[in-house]
């Protein structure tokens, strides 16, 4: 069996042929579609003679051969051309024409994959450069049949190639995929409470990823379910915006026997590819901190015209970061609780936790999530976990079918200290989760209880905490102080509702955030009046806000060392410096 590194380095060797005629950043345009083509070529190899015989028989009868050919290949696809890659090499002068003909011989789903790769352009370009025969010959030397290279290994090879090509062209590879161990953790958290249901034979569940990339999340979830229950079946759905990633995802799903009509090309936010569907499970790693200006018109229109009947009812985040739009999109795709409900996991950066004050789009989205009791848990991951960014990231787990114990509660898990150093960094990714880390986080989540670790000095550091939904809510109150004239007297209103009332001094206006569980009047009496006895609250300006100050809930105060100790240290350092200076001037 070809090992995955050997396979990647073989494919990489093809790049040597392209050097000079192709810019490094364009290698992927040749290598990715050729890898897919060779994979499909190997998959169909053994049934080729039977397919051609069946094709001839059905054409004689004037019957549409397509369904019969799929039955013979045992796949949802076939190739009706008498050619394959090895045969093409037998006619070196017509490789380009024959390669076109071979690709045209595939069933429509496969032709769509090569159209998204814009493979025709590359064939012409390779042909002009006199490289087409050599590249085709090179790919014929490697056996990519699933018996030799498993689907999981193939997926990893694609991810590795995409990451390398992205590095060469300085693109952000993180747009394409999520580290496998992060997906495994998310899949564990998604399925852990449903193990009994999933163990029943004949169970069919749906899984959806609105930012499918090359299909990594869908694949790992499928593998997990198959390991735990070979009789359960997972129907996967996805949408992807990058044409190359979409083509790879679709090819991968095709070989795995998934219905590729469920993988849609396009922008999920402006053009939902599954407008009427809801799902049992969902996973997503949307791009972080990427603005949504391109789709602003469509998104605002849906928000204004459809309100809560559309996807973006609760509110819109600022244009500079669209990740919370994906959160809302996923909420709209949850199977209704009355039909069994849904659970999903989404990777977000820190800003959706706290960006935006009371009444802002972000705060309103958090409010919707918490007031509808959808948030089960947030897991804080270590930094340096992703290929294209070193920032801290968080996995949110949402469900509309919370177990009784979780109702009205949110569990925060701080896994930022659970990591091992990678032997070799990949882009910004220097850390990874070990199997033991994944098990530990999954257990913390599954047991749903508070837990602490002990530092080297023996002090306890919380790693799992449980809160009420209301703990994250607050009232933002506007505190007014009276306007005073030059004589120091309070200025009173002259007419209407304001007649005889003190007028506010805008320059002294202040806002205070009062925790939801506090009584506003009590808070005001306790925190404001002692400092400003003439202040009052303007009730018309009171707003409800929500934020999740994750790190604050795990902060452990370490008292500073005694002053005498610090003084002694400083004196020792100063003495040492004086000695060195003496030595220099000696």
Image (spheres, rainbow, N blue to C red):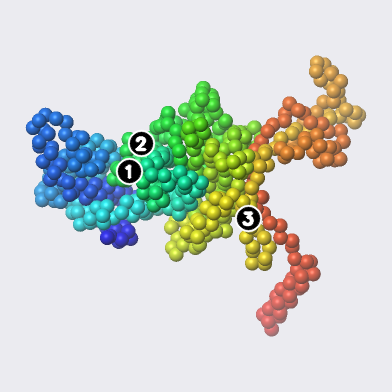
Residue occupied by mark 2: 262
Of 528 and 487, nearer the camera is 528
As drawn, 205 above or below 451? above
Of 181 and 512, nearer the camera is 181
Q: Quadrant of the C terminus?
A: bottom right
Q: Who comes first in sequence, dot 2 or dot 1? A: 1
Which element carries disc 2, helix, strand or loop? helix
Left or right of 13 in this view: 268: right
Q: Which of label 2 and label 3 is nearer to you?
A: 3
Q: Who comes first in sequence, dot 1 or dot 3? A: 1
How far apart are the two marked residues, 1 and 3, measured between alpha carbons?
Answer: 40 Å
What crowding class fits label 3: few (fewer than 14 Cα within 10 Å), some (14-19), or many (20 or more)? some
Q: Is residue 115 visible?
A: no
Query: At 15% from the left edge and 45% from the top edge, which residue is drawn?
Result: 48
Give coordinates of residue 106: x percent, y percent.
21, 39
Give coordinates of residue 485: x percent, y percent.
87, 28
**Contact (Cβ within 8 Å) of mark 2 with mark 3:** no
Of 186 and 543, nearer the camera is 186
Q: Quadrant of the N terminus?
A: bottom left
Which element carries disc 1, helix, strand or loop? helix
Residue occupied by mark 3: 451
Query: At 51% from the left edge and 22% from the top edge, which residue is drawn?
Result: 305
Query: At 67% from the left edge and 60% from the top edge, which residue is drawn?
Result: 460
Residue occupied by mark 1: 253
């Amino acid at each position: 069996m070809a090992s995955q590194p050997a396979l990647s380095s073989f494919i990489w060797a093809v790049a040597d042929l392209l050097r000079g005629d192709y810019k490094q950043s364009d290698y992927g345009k040749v290598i990715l579609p050729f890898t897919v083509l060779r994979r499909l070529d190997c998959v169909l190899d053994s049934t080729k003679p039977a397919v051609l015989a069946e094709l001839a028989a059905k054409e004689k009868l004037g019957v549409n051969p397509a369904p019969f050919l799929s039955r013979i290949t045992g796949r949802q696809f076939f190739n009706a051309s008498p050619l394959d890659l090895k045969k093409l090499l037998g006619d070196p002068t017509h490789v380009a024409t024959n390669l076109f003909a071979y690709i045209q011989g595939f069933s429509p789903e496969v032709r769509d994959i090569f159209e998204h790769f814009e493979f025709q352009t590359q064939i012409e370009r390779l042909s002009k450069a006199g490289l087409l025969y050599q590249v085709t010959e090179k790919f014929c030397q490697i056996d990519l049949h699933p018996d030799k290279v498993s689907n999981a290994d193939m997926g990893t090879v694609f991810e590795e190639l995409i990451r390398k090509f992205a590095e060469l062209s300085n693109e952000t590879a993180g747009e394409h995929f999520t580290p496998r161990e992060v997906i495994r953790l998310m899949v564990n958290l998604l399925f852990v409470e449903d193990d009994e249901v999933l163990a029943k034979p004949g169970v069919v569940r749906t899984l959806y990823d609105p930012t499918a990339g090359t299909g990594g999340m869908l694949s790992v979830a499928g593998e997990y379910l198959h390991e735990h229950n070979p009789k359960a079946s997972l129907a996967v759905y996805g949408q992807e915006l990058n044409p190359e990633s979409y083509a790879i995802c679709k090819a991968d799903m095709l070989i795995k026997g998934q219905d590729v009509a469920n993988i849609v090309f396009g922008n999920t936010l402006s053009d939902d590819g599954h407008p009427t569907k809801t799902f049992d499970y969902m996973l997503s790693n949307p791009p972080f901190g990427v603005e949504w200006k391109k789709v602003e018109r469509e998104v605002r229109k849906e928000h204004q015209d459809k309100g809560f009947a559309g996807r973006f009812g609760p509110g819109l985040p600022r244009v500079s970061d669209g990740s919370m739009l994906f959160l809302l999109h996923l909420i709209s795709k949850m199977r209704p609780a009355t039909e069994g409900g849904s659970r999903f996991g989404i990777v977000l950066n820190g800003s959706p936790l706290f960006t935006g004050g009371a009444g802002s789009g972000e705060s309103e989205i958090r409010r919707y999530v918490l007031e509808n009791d959808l948030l089960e848990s947030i897991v804080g991951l270590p930094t340096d976990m992703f290929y294209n960014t070193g920032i801290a990231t968080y996995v949110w787990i949402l469900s509309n079918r919370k177990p009784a114990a979780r109702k009205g509660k949110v569990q925060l898990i701080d896994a930022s200290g659970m990591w091992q150093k990678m032997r070799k960094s990949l882009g910004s990714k220097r850390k990874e989760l070990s199997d033991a880390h994944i098990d530990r986080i999954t257990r913390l989540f599954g047991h749903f209880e508070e837990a602490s670790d002990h530092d080297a000095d023996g002090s306890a550091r919380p790693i799992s905490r449980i809160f009420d939904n209301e703990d994250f809510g607050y009232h933002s109150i506007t505190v007014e102080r009276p306007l005073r004239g030059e004589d120091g007297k309070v200025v009173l209103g002259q007419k209407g509702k304001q007649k005889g009332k003190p007028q506010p001094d805008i320059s002294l206006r202040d806002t205070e955030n009062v925790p939801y569980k506090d009584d506003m009047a009590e808070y005001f009496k306790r925190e404001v009046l002692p400092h400003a006895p003439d202040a009052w609250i303007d009730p018309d300006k009171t707003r409800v806000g929500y934020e999740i100050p994750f790190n604050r809930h795990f902060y452990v105060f370490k008292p500073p060392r005694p002053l005498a100790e610090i003084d002694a240290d400083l004196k020792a350092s100063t003495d040492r410096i004086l000695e060195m200076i003496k030595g220099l001037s000696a």
